[in-house]
């Protein structure tokens, strides 16, 4: 991971980083899925990484 000088960053370059456990609690994600996400991504991840790695159960429409 690279470190950046905060003073040189533009607001468009900044990313919001979530605590994975907090994100799961707020989103209503099951504890087993939370543990899997922590194994895959670590304790902190961007919202995009979290959204792309969450596996939601299929709901049958028919």
Image (cartoon, grey):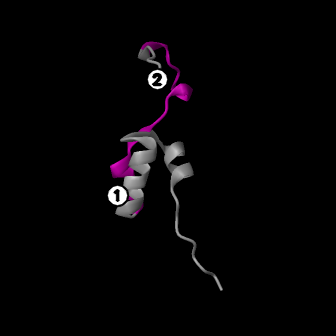
Q: Residues within 10 Å of mark 1 (few under 14, many from 20)?
A: few
User: Residue 3's quadrant in the figure?
Assistant: top left
Q: Is 15 above or below relative to 53?
A: above
* Left or right: 38 as drawn, with respect to 60: left
Asked if the residue at tag 2 contacts the one at tag 1, i.e. Cβ–Cβ closer than 8 Å, the answer is no
SS at circle 1: helix
Q: Residue at x 53, y 69 (%)?
A: 57
The residue to which callout 2 is attached is 1
Secondary structure at badge 2 equals loop
Q: Which sits earlier in the primary sequence, circle 1 or circle 2?
A: 2
Quadrant containing the C terminus in the rendered view: bottom right
Q: Is residue 13 above or below residue 3?
A: below
Closer to viewer: mark 1 or mark 2:
2
Q: Residue furthest right?
A: 62
Q: Nearer the viewer, residue 14 or 60?
A: 60
Question: Which residue is at 33% across, 50% downward?
Answer: 22
Check residue 19 for magenta coloring.
yes
Q: Which mark, residue 25?
A: 1
Q: Is residue 50 magenta?
A: no
C-alpha distance separating marks 1 and 2: 27 Å
When the figure is inspected, residue 27 is found, relative to residue 17, above or below; the finding is: below
Residues in magenta, as a range? 7-29
Residue 50 position, x and y percent, is 49, 48
Residue found at x 46% / y 45%? 40
Give whichever of 43, 15 is nearer the camera. 43
| Circle 2 residues within 10 Å: few <14, some 14–19, many ≥20 | few
Q: Quadrant of residue 5?
A: top left
Image coords of residue 31 (percent x, y) = 35, 61
Q: Is residue 43 found left or right of 8 in the rendered image? A: left
């Amino acid at each position: 991971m690279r470190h950046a000088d905060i003073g040189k960053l533009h607001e468009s370059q900044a990313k919001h980083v979530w605590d994975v456990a907090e994100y799961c609690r707020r989103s209503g994600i099951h504890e087993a899925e939370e543990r899997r996400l922590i194994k895959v991504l670590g304790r902190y991840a961007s919202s995009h990484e979290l959204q792309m790695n969450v596996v939601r159960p299929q709901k049958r429409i028919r």
